[in-house]
Image (spheres, grey):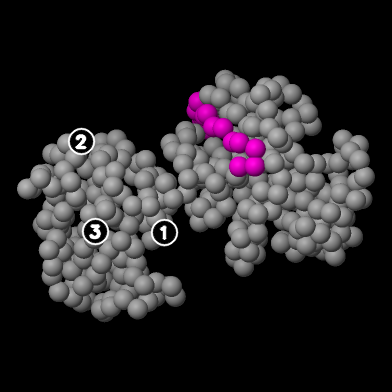
Amino acid sequence: MARLDINSVSKSFGAARPADALSLTVEPGEIVAVFGPSGSGKTVLLRMIAGMFEPDDGDIQVGGRSIVGAAPERRGIGMAFQNFALFPHMSARDNIASGLRAKAAGDVATRVAAISKLLKIEHVLGHTPRELSNGQKQRTALARALIGNPEVLLLDDPLRNVDAKLRYEMRLELPSLLRRGTAAVLYVTQDYREAMAIADRIAVLIGGRLVQVATPDEIYAQPASVAVARLFGDPTINLAEVVPFAEHGALCARVSGAMVGLGSADVDALERECWLGVRPEDLVVSSSPGEGAIPAKILAITPMHEKAVLLLRLADGTEWLAALPPEAPRGAADDAVFIGFAADAAMLFDRATGQKIGLSHRRQAA
């Protein structure tokens, strides 16, 4: 078993800097998802670990041993790519075995049989890549990465090119499959649902910088910044410009002219220009006013099977989204309604920096 340590690693290509002083530790048997928008530096990080690029600064260690400058085959790394990268002239069996043969490792046939059975592709081992479905190609590429029992496993968005049904199935299967080994796993994805379903921790990468590393629940419930909050959730988080103030010992704010309570007063947020963030699923929509209710008008309703999404316009023109369970009353387009939320559903972010402030009582996401 070996731990992966990334210590202050940076990489530049001319004026572009896709990796800026990145530091991250992945324990043996742990799955860490590297999540971020396109161009944030995710693949560059994996390629530095694999040896395709060398870092300009910093160090990368596997089991306490620096691998910077080491040949790729001597790094103890297994890697699967989003485009599968299978040898087109080889059968699935030979593709899986190619890494072992390069190392002259043990009984190749036995190990290929074992890993292909685990991944349910033993019936297509004689097929070439052009005869395989995308799902079978993905499993073949994963088998090739796993068969050598690597100390570190790098998965570069491996489910991106498979259909929705298989992607859902693999989100369920992959965590238990990966935890059967002891590899430290880095899993790159642009899909926040995938990151939350598969990973023990998520490392959020934006503009070449790691902006938050935490468990999926912690990142969803306690995002470090507005940028992180916007990346997680569908529909995305609602935001309003507010300047919180104290009222009878409680923190309050005005949203579209209505005064809403935010729980116990926090001196860090008082009289400070903030963004108020509320998740769409935390909004309550009613036809009658109540304490702290915000008047709004329904612009549109989109049924989404497990929920209905309401597009709402507040009195000041701000548009918010509410995600309601199917059984909840929802009204109709053009209806006047009132929306509210519990104090523990609110998040405050500094408007100048985007960083989260106060409101440490925010509950964990289900």
Query: Around disc 1, counting alpha carbons within 10 Å, would you say few (fewer than 14), some (14 to 19), or many (20 or more)?
Result: few
The local secondary structure at tag 3 comes to loop
Residue visible at 43% across and 36% down?
A: 211
Picture disc at residue 366: 1
Q: Which residues are magenta?
A: 16-30
**Contact between labelled residues 1 and 3, with CB atoms less than 8 Å apart:** no
Residue visible at 78% across and 54% down?
A: 140
- Of callouts 3 and 1, the N-terminal one: 3
Q: Is residue 82 left or right of residue 127?
A: left
Is residue 20 located in the magenta-colored stretch of the structure? yes
- Report the front residue among 247 and 158: 247
Q: Is residue 205 left or right of residue 147?
A: left
Q: Which residue is mark 2?
A: 268
- Report the front residue among 279 and 200: 200
Is residue 220 located in the magenta-colored stretch of the structure? no
Q: Is residue 232 left or right of residue 297?
A: right
Residue 134: x, y in percent? 72, 61
Residue 118 position by quadrant: bottom right
Q: Is residue 311 above or below residue 33?
A: below
Majority secondary structure of magenta residues:
strand
Q: Which residue is mark 3?
A: 342
